[in-house]
Amino acid sequence: MNVKRFTARTSRDALALVRQAFGDDAVVMSTRPCAEGVEVLAMAPESVQQLERVGAAAPHVEAPRQPVVPASKAPGRAEPKADPRASGRIEPRLEPQFGPDVEDDIEALQMSTLSFQDYVRERMLKRRQAELEAEAPVAPARTAVSSIDAARARQAEARPAASMPHVALQTPAAAAAPMAPARPAAAAPAPLPTPARHEPPVLREEARHAAATQAHAHAEAAARRDQTELLQQELRSMRGLIEQRFGALAFMEKLQRQPRAAALTQKLLDAGFSPGLVRMLAENMPAQGDEIGWAAGILERNLPTGEREPSLEDQGGVYAMIGSTGVGKTTSTAKLAAAFATRHGAAHLGLITLDAYRVGAHEQLRTYGRILGVPVHTAHDRASLEDLLELLSGKKMVLIDTAGMAQRDSRTRELLDMLSHRSIKRLLVVNAAQQGETIEDVLTAYGAAQCCGIVLSKIDEAVKLAPALDALIRLKLKVVAVGNGQRVPEDWHRLSAGTLVQRALKAAANPVWRMDNADMNLVFAGGPGAGAQLHA
């Protein structure tokens, strides 16, 4: 008998090695996990035939039948069997004699699992049943009722008790009934009870191996899913990069073919407008005409201002100046108060300050109030603010000066909640000299969409006005007033959209910050940006 051991990383690879060595009819004896992965014991199909031949050649020794004891002699219990050693007589033990090759095969067979032993035993019993049927002259009823299970029961009775312990399977009814006397030879024997089929037990090593195999399969599936997701992400990023590069190349090629579009792009970028807005204007530029004048007209129509509406001092109402630190809220409040007092008188004006955070902050507004002859009230919370608004409800205009807070300060939300009174209108003061990204961050944090207007302060300090106008155009916010100095109220103006756009386009760019053609390629290599929705 040729039994070989195969080891591989997985059971599938081990079975492939078994098929390669013994063919598709190979017999797998056992499988178990090992340090290399999986270990499989297998043998060739010819070895099974050899075992059958060995079993057929073994002499069959029947054990002597014990005399039947009548039921009357054993009313309560069975008599103990006589011990052969007590009588001084030792029964000889009959064992089949095998050759050396067969003994080696039997020793190798002992390494198989219980399932393989059952398989070989069933084959041997089938062979023995065929021989018994050939020896019987006429036994139609016996042949009809005989089966493999009956032959297995006779084989168990024929084995000596000392050779191998074997428990004969029997039904509960057969165990309870006393042994019946022998029937005459003419009567047909009753069919033997069919014992329960012996199922091969599942070994612990096989269960652990199955669990390890299943866990390994789950791990491999998870690894494959992770690799698939990573590959999809890489493909998406590669696709986006290709689209950006091709878009930038197409745009730059268009600029090279159209010198007027290239000149407009250079002009707008030098003024400080964002690349997204510049790209949109360059792509929609007409084939003929003055490109700078056309772009200025587009920007004017998309920049809302309050030049055609009554001024704030003529409208009246309750206004709160909000904004980040140092943008000129107190100065803008004083300018608007002075403009109102000049037209309608100080008796119709009320001033409230909420700036209780800075040391002496309210003194600046009180100084302007003493100059105008208007008392300044201080509110520390929302309740006091509502009381002051009720006290000043007879005034035509009430101005509220708030404390300056950074747009990312947690107290900014508390300030906005405090000003959520239905009668208060918010005016967001924006420093025109700040960077475009900072201005847009301030507009978003202070909720510029819920404000009634924007006050552009410090336009005299701004080298480039285009970043502020670009953010206002993108968010569609209205400019109600501008401040271009510290004088009160002389530096308080209402400018039209055309004036603001022309001031932004006339900004002289410093040569250090001026972009040439190579710099423009770098700017537009990143693909189209989030430009504004312009109306022609």
Image (spheres, helix red, strand yellow):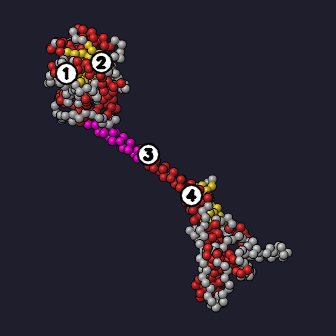
Per the rendered image, the range of residues in magenta is 229-254
Q: Nearer the viewer, mark 1 or mark 4?
A: 1
User: Neighbour class for label 3 at 10 Å: few (<14), some, many (≥20)?
Assistant: few
Q: Check if mark 1's residue and mark 2's residue have beta carbons within 8 Å.
A: no
The residue to which callout 1 is attached is 317
The residue to which callout 4 is attached is 210
Task: Give me the C-alpha separation between circle 1 and circle 2.
Answer: 18 Å
Q: N-terminal of the two: label 4 or label 3?
A: 4
Q: Quadrant of residue 188?
A: bottom right
Q: Quadrant of residue 124?
A: bottom right
Q: Position of residue 208 (x, y in %)?
A: 59, 56
- The residue under the point 67% across, 80% down is 179
Q: Is residue 469 magenta?
A: no
Q: Main secondary structure of the magenta part?
A: helix
Q: Is residue 243 magenta?
A: yes
- The residue under the point 56% across, 62% down is 16
- The residue under the point 80% across, 73% down is 83
Q: Nearer the viewer, mark 4 or mark 3?
A: 4
Residue 379: assigned label: 2
Describe the element under mark 1 as helix, strand or loop: strand
Q: Nearer the viewer, mark 4 or mark 2?
A: 2
Residue 230: assigned label: 3
User: Neighbour class for label 2 at 10 Å: few (<14), some, many (≥20)?
Assistant: some
